[in-house]
Amino acid sequence: MKENKLFKGKTLAILSGGGDTPAINSSIEAVRNRASMLGFKVYGIRKGWKGLLGDGDVVDLTCQPYSGLYGGTALRSSRTNPFPSKKNPEDRVPQVLRNLKRYKIDVLVTIGGDDTNGAAKRLYEQEGIPVIGFPKTIDNDLRTKTWHTFEDKTVDAVICPGFPTAAKSIAEFASRIKTTAESHSRIMVMEVMGRDAGWLTGAGTFGSGTLSLIPEVEMNKERKDFFLELVNEEYQRNPKKTLIIPVSEGVRWYDDATGKTDVVYASTEQDEYGHARLGGVSGAIASEISNKLHIDARAQVTGYYPRSGVCSEYDRRFTQTLADKVVDLLLREEYGKMPVLNKVCKYEELEEFNCSSIDMGAIGNRPLPKEYFDENTFKFTPMYLDFLSHIIGKPHYPEFLYDFPVVIPEED
């Protein structure tokens, strides 16, 4: 009976911060359902940390319908940092502490990346607030200590909720623009989200992407010239005279005019975590291909497409599996931790026994392992292809398989 539940009289609150993903609502629903079964009253804090400032912005999720299939976050989000920052030097932690007390919140679950969970970690370490982090990022660059073994190698990989759905979307995007690239014998430079890491960019290779550029490999003058040579060779070798080139938005590209190698900014204005908005490197690359190689090239920015849409089956089961681990942490009262997968798993293996938890102090950014990308050929390796195939299945390379006989006019 309800009155016998272990955490009856306790309140657990959930917030989501930073960029949205298709798996956040699924994460909220999964955590809410399990916390409710334990007896918690469950609140939702709206707009991330912003919902704990001022008078607070809190809603009751207990016994309410909730669609975890719908992408994004119904609790909404923001990039609010409660700690002092360059953009906002005010220390707003006292407001957070005051509202946690006012709303009688006993445990806080923060769904986010390094920024959101980093702030939660500081609250736990400095103020003793009972916090459990929940991973979230389509960039897939949040260190989760997830091991991937391929042939005779084992690497420290990452799988975060949101990435599986986003990777599937990027593969489909690349597959779709291939038809228009072929129709015009063009090179398509496909820009993909990824400020510091190329995990998501690699998904473009599952939809006919060939050469790729990632933030981990700086494109100085020498490397840029070598890359352009490879682009020309690949294009000329292709019978349909077309290429799809996925590139991360965070690629550092050499600028002939300034003589500097740097990222391309869509806006230099920074958020409260010190991040400026990136965007436009695909246009710079496509322009150089057109001008230097005299090959028709176009930039195609995927933008928010991989963030959007419904939650995939893999992400759905993944969030439920991690929420099962949250139950374990709640029962043990092990706060200051984040649930993670132990190993790269196929859909059927997404079970709590393949999970563990890591200390939130160990959370940080994890770049793409060098074993996943060959910087000499600008191609993702078989080990990366194996990694991603566990998550979204085998690559799909659409082809128009017909060829036509050339007509030669008859001599009079």
Image (cartoon, rainbow, N blue to C red):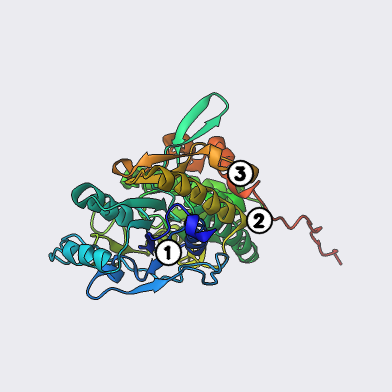
Taking the image as shown, residue 237 lies to the left or right of residue 291, namely: right
219 or 331, which lies in front? 331
> Which of label 1 and label 3 is nearer to you?
1
Tell me which amino acid carries mark 2. Answer: Lys
Q: Can residue 253 be seen at all in this image of the molecule? A: no
Q: Residue 240 carries which label?
A: 2
Tell me which amino acid carries mark 1. Answer: Lys
Residue 136, image x, y percentages:
43, 55
Mark 1 element type: strand
379 or 98, which lies in front? 98
Q: Residues within 10 Å of mark 2 (few under 14, many from 20)?
A: some
Most extreme residue toward the top is 152
Q: Distance between the residues labelled 1 and 2?
A: 60 Å
Residue at position x 49%, y 64% from top?
Answer: 25
Residue 380, image x, y percentages:
51, 42
Q: Distance between the residues labelled 3 and 2?
A: 27 Å
Mark 3 element type: helix
Residue 125, image x, y percentages:
22, 47
* Circle 1 residue: 41
128 or 338, which lies in front? 128
Looking at the image, tell me whether mark 3 or mark 2 is earlier in sequence order: 2
207 relative to 352, above or below: below
